[in-house]
Amino acid sequence: MNAILELRGVRAAYDDITVLHGIDLSVAPGQIVALLGPNGAGKTTALKVAAGVHPVASGQLVIGGRDVTGAAARDLARLGICLIPEGRGVFPNLSVRDNLLMMTFTGKSRDEIEEVAYSRFPILGKRAAQTAGTLSGGEQQMLALCRGLATDPAVLMLDELSMGLAPLVVDQLYEQVAEIARQGVAVLVVEQFAATVLDISEHAAVLVRGRVQHQGAPDEEFRTELAGLYLGSNA
């Protein structure tokens, strides 16, 4: 299957410090790709580059076969690129309902957006009038996911979805991520804790010091290699 999102030989830097050293990465429709690695490996920067939030120093960002290197984040969003950043991505002072209401700019009605959100995560329906900042961490991630899905993304990128959450909540969230992929959405997931995402991923790449050190199907051989890469990273 042809990739919808590709990073080709991408380098990225912060001032004079190079963070990504020519990485290659691709995601196809309906595929879940896990981007793994220790802290400071460059995983979040890779997502930011793919979303147009951080510039490419060299290499190409390709969406649907089209070179969009240098495109603004808003233009990539119109092409269906959705990034849910680390730290939830909700408006904490607004209610759950008003957080969803803000997504009507996509052209969907409030009722449509709420119906999808509450059917996917019934707990949000029970919390509709509650201020988002008072939700549990897991509920905030559910709300962030629903806000992102309201844009009908072609590519959904998730940064540390599991951070600070209980294992049962993480399992529930990743069940929904797997369902989203089954509907044809390409999913790129950054996770520091590999075990939480490998079971639902078709492909995984390990980033160490800004370079893809290993990638492939997340089988037992891959997982054995992964442990060595983490231990050898000094990170």
Image: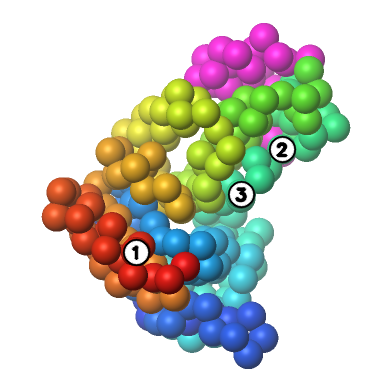
Q: Which mark is residue 86?
A: 3
Q: Which stretch did the figure color magenta? A: 103-129
Neighbours of disc 3 within 10 Å: few (<14), some (14-19), many (20+) = some
Going from the N terminus, do you reach mark 2 or mark 1 first? 2
Residue shown at the point (63%, 90%) measured from the top left:
16
Does the CB distance between marks 2 and 1 fall below 8 Å?
A: no
Nearer-N-terminus badge (1/3): 3
Picture quarter containing residue 22? bottom left
Inspect the image, locate mark 3, and give the three-letter code of the amino acid beneath it.
Glu
**Vertical comparison of 183 with 37: above or below:** above
* Mark 2–mark 1 distance (CA, rounded to whole Å): 35 Å
Task: Between residue 220 and residue 67, name the one nearer to us.
Answer: 220
> Residue 231: which numbered mark, if any?
1
Majority secondary structure of the magenta segment? helix
In depth, the one of 29 and 223 nearer the eye is 223
Is residue 96 left or right of 226 when viewed as pictured?
Answer: right
How busy is the neighbourhood of tag 2: few (under 14 within 10 Å), some, or many (20 plus)? many
Rendering coords of residue 194 (x, y %): 36, 48
Residue that mark 2 sits on = 90
Amino acid residing under circle 1: Leu
Confirm or deny contact between disc 1 and disc 3 (CB under 8 A): no
Q: Residues within 10 Å of mark 1 (few under 14, many from 20)?
A: few
Q: Secondary structure at mark 1?
A: helix
Residue at 53 percent of width and 68 percent of height? 40
Query: Which kind of residue does numbered mark 2 sit on?
Result: Val
Give yes or no for residue 87 being in the magenta stretch: no
